[in-house]
Amino acid sequence: MSQRVFITGGASGLGRALALRYARQGARVCIGDVNPESGLVAEDELNAAGGEALFMPCDVRRLSDLEKVRAELESRWGGVDIVVNNAGVATAGSIEDSTIADWEWILDINVLGVVRGCKVFTPLLKRQGSGTIVNVASMAGLMLAPLMDSYNVSKAGVIALSETLNLELGDAGIHVCCVCPSFFQTNLASGMRSDLPGIQQNINKLMKHSTVTAEDVADDIIRAVENHEFWVLPHQREKRLWILKRHAPWAFEYIMRRQSRRWSKRMAGG
């Protein structure tokens, strides 16, 4: 029987790339997104790719939207095998300059959006006795670069939640996977909130020069789900730095302080 997949933020970027990968495998894929035009276009693409596609309007800030998706998937497909909490937004700025409104906005989407997805679908996965929850975080939540205060905190929150659920839900037959990519080409910066001049151009430049694509990250996620792995760390350089942080934190801090000075100048448009 074909896999049943639900992806938030599935109409663009990594969500769309992952949805297309699953569709080409013949999966039944539901994409939730706040953009109905992009969602319907993606739905057609998934059907053309060989999957059975369904688009549902879904704002992860509303628990009721996710509950409607769960009810529809139970009615239409009898449940779901893979839930991907992918929807997210970006901010940049220092602790002095970032507004509380921006902090509340990003935490509501990036952290509580993932919390809502996990809360709504965990009872269904428990009843099934199987399933996978994929939470898309970021290397920002592990590496903690300067001038990304609220974004770093939001992604660190997703990592903490994922590690907790990995222990909490394992005995229920539920696999949890945490995805931590660094820069790759996506549309994340298009809706970024920041008062830093030139920040979108600088972020887009870093994304453009990355050798890792959304399709690469999607492939890594699929392999991790198949192999029941927890971590998905697609960028090898950042993965090595994270390992260094765990085993030689003094060396990591020395490297990061040097890089942080360059990063701060770049992020500030210097």
Image (spheres, rainbow, N blue to C red):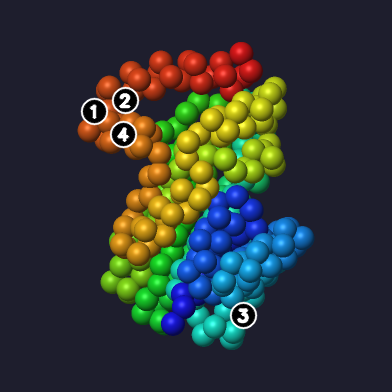
- As shown in the figure, which amino acid type bears the numbered disc 2? Phe
The mark that comes first in sequence, 2 or 3, is: 3
Within 10 Å of disc 1 (Cα), the crowding (few <14, some 14-19, many 20+) is: few
Mark 1 to mark 2 CA distance (whole Å): 6 Å
Nearest to the eye among marks 2 and 4: give it: 4
The mark that comes first in sequence, 3 or 1, is: 3
- As shown in the figure, which amino acid type bears the numbered disc 3? Glu
The N terminus sits in image quarter: bottom left
Q: Which residue is mark 2?
A: 252
Within 10 Å of disc 2 (Cα), the crowding (few <14, some 14-19, many 20+) is: some
Badge number at residue 240: 4
Badge number at residue 248: 1
**Residue positioned 33% across, 18% down in the render:** 254
Contact flag, marks 1 and 2 (Cβ < 8 Å): yes
- Is residue 59 in view? no
Mark 4 to mark 1 CA distance (whole Å): 11 Å
Q: Which residue is mark 3?
A: 72
Residue 70 image point, x, y percent: 57, 76
Badge number at residue 67: none
